[in-house]
Image: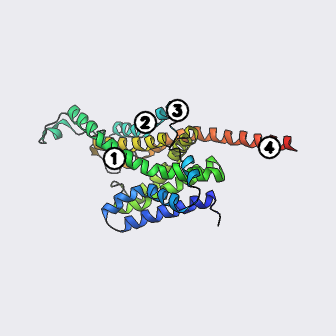
Amino acid sequence: MEMTPVRSAAAFSMTVLLLTLLANLSGNMNLVALSQLAPIITVILMLIILPGRRDALRSSGLGTVGGLRWYFAAILSIVPIGVGFVAAWAFGIVHLPSAEFLSQGTAHFTVSEYAWYITKSSWSPIMLISMLIFSFGEEIGWRGYLQPKLTEACGIRKSIMITAAVWACFHYPFYINQYNADGNVWIDLVLFTVMIFPLSVFMGWVRWRSRSIWPVVLIHMIINLSRNWLEQLFFDKASGWSYVAGESGVITIAVWAACAAVIWVRLKKHAQVKKTSGELTGIHAR
């Protein structure tokens, strides 16, 4: 049986989702943690078992650095989560710990000392390295293997949406093990799913335009690091704070949605130009 791009994408998706589900159902937290690397494990299996290894590696974006502007775009991925936390702080939903609270601890931090300590620990070399490993472990699957296969079969816009859907499903089993400890799990699940799609438009577009996997690895890494940093920094949080701020709060979603809308218009124009160009080529060939 010929292994078409669609079949390769389907085989990858089913395998990675099955591995993740089984790991999360096992109850073994080491397996749960390891299952975050299920995408790269699945890619390795696909490269070993399926034909077309060279083409898959060539299309993965591993060997392309990409332009500097795409790394600048990656750094800006801190903005949506940052805006969400600043807004939540302004509304009184999250707070920095008070000076009185900090003075009761053994360290006797001031508020500024606490902020600096959290910032240093959240962006320490060990955190950077560990987040880089896990971000690469996911992105080599989503936008290194799956999206290129789907783009070849059905174009960039559909490939972005399908990749987003698989990426969202990948995270669902983690909610069994309290991926998000705040709020109602079903509300969190819905918000997370809504957030994934505009974020995937941004990441998929960067991957497609840069032709490199590395800018999207950096995006994934920065989002995870900034989420961890700001959640610790704003220590005092009201119940349900994650509905507003954080990785998939409504304000974060709104910022990503605005960004995705602009990109989607560009992708639509590109598709129209490509279609017109193809029609003209067909006319000239007659």
Is the residue marked by circle 4 packed among few (<14), some (14-19), or many (20+) residues within 10 Å? few
Q: Which sits earlier in the primary sequence, circle 4 or circle 1?
A: 1
Residue reaching furthest right?
286
User: From where the camera sits, is residue 248 visible?
Assistant: no
| Quadrant assignment, res 102 | top left
In three-dimensional space, the C-alpha distance between marks 3 and 1, rounded to whole angstroms, equals 25 Å
**Disc 4 and disc 1: Cα gap in Å?**
49 Å
Kindly report the distance in space between the C-alpha atoms of the residues bearing marks 4 and 2. 41 Å
Q: Position of residue 262 (x, y in %)?
A: 58, 37
Label 1 sits on residue:
130
> Which residue occupies 45% across, 54% down?
40
CA distance for labels 1 and 2: 22 Å
- The residue pinned by badge 4 equals 279
Q: Looking at the image, is mark 4 or mark 2 earlier in the sequence?
A: 2
Q: Residue at x 32, y 41 (%)?
A: 229
Rounded to the nearest whole Å, what is the CA distance between mark 4 and mark 3?
32 Å
User: Are the two marked residues, 3 and 1, in contact with CB atoms closer than 8 angstroms?
Assistant: no
| The label number, if any, that marks residue 79 in the structure image | 2
Helix, strand or loop for disc 4: helix
Q: Are marks 4 and 2 in contact (CB under 8 Å)?
A: no
Residue type (three-letter) at the residue carrying disc 3: Gly
Residue bearing mark 3: 67
